[in-house]
Image (cartoon, rainbow, N blue to C red):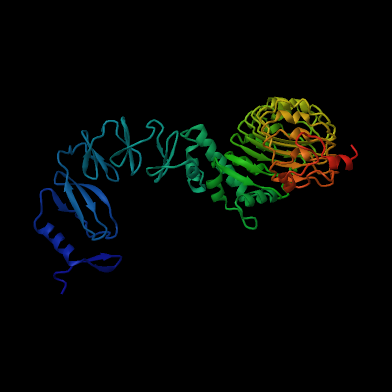
């Protein structure tokens, strides 16, 4: 019954071979070749696909296996020196003349040939994966375990070179940490991996405040932070943007692991110590407003910073920002002693400050790249020194005793002006400015807005301001040309009588 069918024994069970495979194998037995033979124990370990070298009758055979049908077919190697032949590892063998891989002669230097693992070998000319040359640093290349290898610059999984973010994953970095003591990796890669390990230790056992930050970063405020994901996605992310405002934070030390931060908002918390920020060399935008911060010296090395907001009532000294030459937008509030540090920030485009003490406003005249200037200084009544701000497009001076705004005639590009809550009475200086479209004069002493008559105004506001009856009082009246004056700037007869002039 079983005369034409082969059964294999595997773990005490008979396994039926398909008839076609039975025929092929039988033919190899009946018509043996001088180059091929059936490996002696081919009916053993049916499910294992293995490879081996065998010496039979003064010939060397390479025995390859196929786990699907269980046969092992031996191929004879030609020209082998039997006396020096030896198996080196899985798939590799050699004699005094040659190196073999999977039974084939490969072009490697047999004198310097070294087996590094089942996958990697090496000679004086390079490192090889199986029989193919592998692109790596030959002098520092080391195998860590069955799947991982490193050189001084990279970490590899088999032949795949990992990216920076992939190196930071918990599993891979744990394996790569074996390379620390071998002094294989460069200082930078070591630092990245070591920072990741320290981060993981903190992330898995955070304090209450650290947990708040970690969950906020991961946007999972009411669940455990996914440490492995945080490690992979954020530690080496050079475009990382974090908003951590309104979190009642006092400790921001967990941020030290995210050196690639480019944008950070930690406003409206209870933070007093910002020393960790000195590590963020790539930071471009920073908001530390509404925190009880008094010392901003950690900011003095953030040379790439372009936008900074620090509205803090406790702020006194801003000297630390004078070296931040790339700043383009700056917002300051506090009891600032002096504005002198701003003198060197010549790239500033937008400046807003609110100070109860500063009086040296003239230092701003050096900032001729400014397009927007906004300030509240309660003890400033004269701004005539700001005559060189020709690029100014927006000016806001509020809650100040200022009266004279004649310096505005030097701002030909001005399109918006806000003089709310000042002592300004005369706005005739605005008449020749062709780009003016927004004017706010709420709570001022202006009595006549006629200089704006005939202009297109997108916004005009004059609440609680004693404008005359004949003065335009809305944007539409501006457009309609309502005015107390004739074209020659004399009062119209009716209004001259009404005003008794």
Please provide percent x and percent y for residue 123: 31, 32
Please provide percent x and percent y for residue 382: 82, 29
The picture quadrant where one finds residue 444 is top right
Indicate left or right for 156 with 300 as reference. left
Q: Residue furthest right?
A: 500
Residue at (39% x, 32% y) in the render:
137
Residue at (44% x, 42% y) in the render:
162
Residue nearest the observer in this picture, 64 or 498 = 498
Please provide percent x and percent y for residue 236: 54, 41
Q: Which residue lies furthest to the bottom in this view?
A: 1
Please provide percent x and percent y for residue 70: 24, 59
Indicate left or right for 402 with 321 as reference. right
Does residue 233 appear anywhere in the picture? yes
Indicate left or right for 80 with 268 as reference. left
Residue nearest the observer in this picture, 242 or 79 = 242
Quadrant showing the N terminus: bottom left
Q: In this view, does 152 lie above or below 157?
A: above
Q: Residue furthest left?
A: 31
Quadrant showing the C terminus: top right
Residue nearest the observer in this picture, 182 or 353 = 353
The picture quadrant where one finds residue 282 is top right
């Amino acid at each position: 019954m079983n005369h034409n069918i082969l059964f294999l024994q595997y773990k005490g069970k008979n396994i039926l071979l398909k008839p076609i495979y039975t025929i092929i194998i039988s033919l190899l037995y009946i018509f043996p070749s001088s180059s091929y033979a059936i490996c002696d124990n081919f009916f053993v370990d049916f499910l294992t696909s293995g490879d081996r070298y065998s010496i039979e009758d003064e010939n060397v055979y390479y025995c390859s296996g196929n786990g699907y049908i269980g046969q092992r077919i031996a191929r004879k190697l030609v020209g082998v020196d039997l006396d020096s032949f030896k198996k080196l590892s899985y798939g590799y063998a050699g004699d005094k003349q040659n190196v073999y891989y999977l039974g084939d002669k490969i072009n490697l230097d047999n004198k310097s040939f070294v087996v590094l693992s089942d996958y990697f070998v090496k000679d004086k000319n390079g490192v090889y994966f199986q029989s193919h040359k592998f692109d790596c640093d030959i002098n520092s290349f080391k195998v860590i375990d069955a799947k991982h290898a490193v050189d001084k610059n990279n970490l590899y999984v088999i032949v795949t070179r990992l990216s920076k973010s992939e190196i930071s994953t918990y599993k891979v970095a744990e394996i790569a940490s074996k390379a620390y003591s071998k002094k294989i990796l460069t200082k930078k890669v070591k630092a990245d991996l070591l920072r990741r390990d320290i981060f993981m230790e903190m992330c898995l056992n955070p304090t209450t405040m650290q947990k708040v930050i970690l969950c906020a970063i991961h946007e999972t405020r009411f669940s455990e932070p996914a440490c492995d994901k945080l490690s992979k996605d954020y530690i080496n992310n050079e475009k990382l943007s974090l908003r951590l405002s309104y979190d009642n934070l006092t400790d921001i030390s967990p941020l030290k692991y995210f050196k690639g931060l480019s944008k950070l908002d930690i406003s409206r918390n209870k933070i007093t110590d910002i020393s960790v920020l000195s590590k963020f060399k790539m930071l471009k935008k920073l908001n530390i407003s509404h925190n009880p911060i008094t010392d901003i010296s950690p900011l003095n090395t953030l040379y790439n910073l372009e936008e900074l907001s620090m509205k803090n009532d406790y702020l006194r000294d801003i000297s630390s920002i004078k070296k931040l030459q790339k700043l383009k937008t700056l917002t300051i509030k506090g009891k600032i002693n002096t504005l002198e540090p701003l003198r060197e920030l010549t790239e500033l485009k937008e400046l807003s400050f609110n100070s109860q003490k500063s009086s040296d406003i003239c230092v701003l005249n050096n900032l001729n790249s400014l397009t927007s200037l906004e300030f509240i200084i309660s003890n400033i009544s004269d701004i005539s020194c700001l005559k060189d701000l020709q690029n100014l497009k927006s000016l806001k001076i509020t809650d100040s005793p200022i009266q004279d705004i004649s310096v505005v005639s030097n701002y030909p590009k001005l399109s918006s002006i806000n003089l709310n809550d000042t002592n300004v009475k005369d706005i005739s200086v605005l008449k020749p400015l062709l780009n003016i479209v927004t004017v706010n004069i709420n709570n001022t002493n202006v009595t006549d807005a006629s200089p704006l008559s005939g202009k297109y105004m997108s916004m005009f506001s004059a609440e609680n301001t004693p404008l005359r009856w004949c003065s335009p009082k809305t944007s539409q009246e501006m457009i309609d040309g309502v005015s107390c004056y004739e074209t020659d700037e004399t009062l119209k007869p009716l209004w001259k009588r009404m005003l008794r002039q």
